[in-house]
C-alpha cells in the first residue's frame, strides 16, 4: 500500500517540489504582511482597522484544521496497515496543530479584548475551540501513558479519529446552531464570497493557503527530526 | 416659566449620553483601541511571529539534546 508513496517521497521531483513550495510559502507571507497592513480599509463600526486581523487570525485555525485532517487520514491508514513512521507523523501533526491552535487562541483573545470587550467573551466558538484543543492535548497525554509502541500507536490512532470528528462538530457545526459573536455563526454574515470586499479577498485567501503550507512545512521538519532520532536510537540499542 | 422649564429639560437630557465611552481608552485594551484599532493587527502579527520563533527555539533545543544524547551514547 505504501510502496508507491515511498517511491514518490524518495524521488528528486518531490524535493524540487518541496523547495518550490517553501519559496511560495515565504512569498505569500511577505505579500500578506506587506499588503495586509497597507491596503485601503474603510472604518466599519466596532471593528474599524482591526478587520485586517482576519488575515492573520483565521488562517491559524485553518492550518490547525488541515493538520488535524492529515492526522485523521494517517490514523485511518495506520489502522489499516501499521507502520511506525506514520505513527510518528500523526504525533507531529497533532503537536504542530496544537501550536497553531494556541496561537490562534491568543490572537483571538487580543482581538476580542478590543472589539468584543473582554479577553474571553462568552462566545460558543471560543469555548468550542478551547474544548477541541483540550481534546487533542489529551491525545498527547494518552500517548505518554503507554509503554509498548504498537499498542500506543493503535489506541492513539483510534482516539485521534474520535477527536477529529468531535472537532468537526464543535468548531464547524455547533457555533452555527447557537448564538455567537463570530462571523458566519449564530446568524452573522460570514467571510464568504458575498460578504468580503474584492480588496481583502485575495489577501485573505492567499493567507489561508500560506498558513496551511507553513503548517505542513513545520510538521514535516519536526517529523524528519523525530524519525531520525528514532532511527538513531534503534541503531544504538539494537 | 415655560421657557425656563424647556431650557432645564434640554440641559437634563444630556445626562443620557454620559454612559457612553465608559472603559474606552483605559488599560492595555484601551491602548490597542487607539488609532482605529490598528494596533490590534500589529499585536496579532507580533504574537504570531514571537510564537513561531519561540517554537523554533524549542525545537532547536530538543535537537541539541538529541545530538548530545547521541554523542554520549556512542
Image (cartoon, coloured by chain):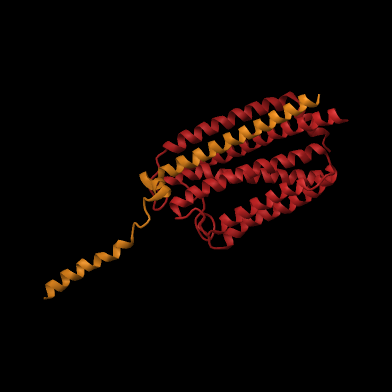
Chain colours: A red, B orange
Q: Position of residue A144 (x, y in %)?
A: 76, 45
Q: Residue at x 53, y 33 (%)?
A: A29
Up the image or down, A124 lies above or below A227; here it is below
Q: Quadrant of the C terminus of chain B?
A: top right
Residue A226 is drawn in which quadrant? top right
Q: Quadrant of the N terminus of chain B?
A: bottom left
Residue A5 is drawn in which quadrant? top right
Q: Residue at x 78, y 41 (%)?
A: A87
Q: Position of residue A177 (x, y in %)?
A: 58, 62
Up the image or down, A183 lies above or below A80; here it is below
Q: Position of residue B67 (x, y in %)?
A: 73, 27
Q: Residue at x 67, y 43 (%)?
A: A67
Q: Position of residue B33 (x, y in %)?
A: 39, 48
Up the image or down, A39 lies above or below A113; here it is above
Up the image or down, A27 lies above or below A92; here it is above
- A182 left or right of A6? left
Observer-nearest residue: A89 or A6?
A: A89
Q: Residue at x 81, y 38 (%)?
A: A84
- The mark total stands at 0
Amino acid at each position: 500500500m505504501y510502496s508507491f508513496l515511498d517511491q514518490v517521497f524518495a524521488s528528486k521531483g518531490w524535493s524540487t517540489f518541496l523547495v518550490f513550495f517553501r519559496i511560495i510559502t515565504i512569498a505569500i507571507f511577505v505579500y500578506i504582511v506587506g499588503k495586509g497592513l497597507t491596503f485601503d480599509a474603510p472604518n466599519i463600526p466596532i471593528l474599524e482597522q482591526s478587520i485586517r486581523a482576519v488575515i492573520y487570525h483565521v488562517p491559524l485555525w485553518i492550518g490547525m484544521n488541515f493538520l488535524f485532517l492529515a492526522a485523521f487520514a494517517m490514523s485511518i491508514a495506520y489502522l489499516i496497515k501499521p507502520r511506525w513512521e506514520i505513527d510518528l507523523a500523526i504525533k507531529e501533526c497533532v503537536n504542530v496543530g496544537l501550536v497553531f491552535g494556541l496561537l490562534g487562541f491568543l490572537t483571538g483573545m487580543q482581538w476580542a479584548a478590543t472589539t468584543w470587550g473582554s479577553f474571553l467573551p462568552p462566545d460558543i466558538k471560543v469555548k468550542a475551540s478551547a474544548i477541541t484543543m483540550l481534546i487533542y492535548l489529551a491525545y498527547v497525554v494518552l500517548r505518554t501513558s503507554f509503554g509498548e509502541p504498537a499498542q500506543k500507536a493503535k489506541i492513539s490512532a483510534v482516539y485521534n479519529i474520535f477527536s477529529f470528528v468531535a472537532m468537526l462538530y464543535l468548531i464547524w457545526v455547533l457555533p452555527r446552531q447557537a448564538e455567537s459573536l463570530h462571523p458566519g455563526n449564530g446568524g452573522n454574515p460570514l467571510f464568504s464570497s458575498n460578504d468580503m470586499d474584492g480588496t481583502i479577498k485575495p489577501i485573505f485567501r492567499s493567507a489561508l493557503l500560506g498558513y496551511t503550507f507553513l503548517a505542513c512545512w513545520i510538521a514535516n521538519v519536526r517529523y524528519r527530526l523525530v524519525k531520525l532520532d528514532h532511527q538513531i536510537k534503534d541503531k544504538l540499542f539494537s | 416659566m415655560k421657557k425656563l422649564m424647556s431650557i432645564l429639560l434640554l440641559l437634563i437630557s444630556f445626562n443620557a449620553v454620559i454612559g457612553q465611552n465608559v472603559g474606552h481608552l483605559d488599560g492595555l485594551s484601551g491602548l490597542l483601541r487607539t488609532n482605529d484599532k490598528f494596533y490590534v493587527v500589529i499585536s496579532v502579527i507580533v504574537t504570531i511571529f514571537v510564537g513561531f520563533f519561540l517554537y523554533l527555539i524549542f525545537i532547536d533545543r530538543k535537537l541539541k539534546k538529541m545530538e548530545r544524547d547521541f554523542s554520549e551514547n556512542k
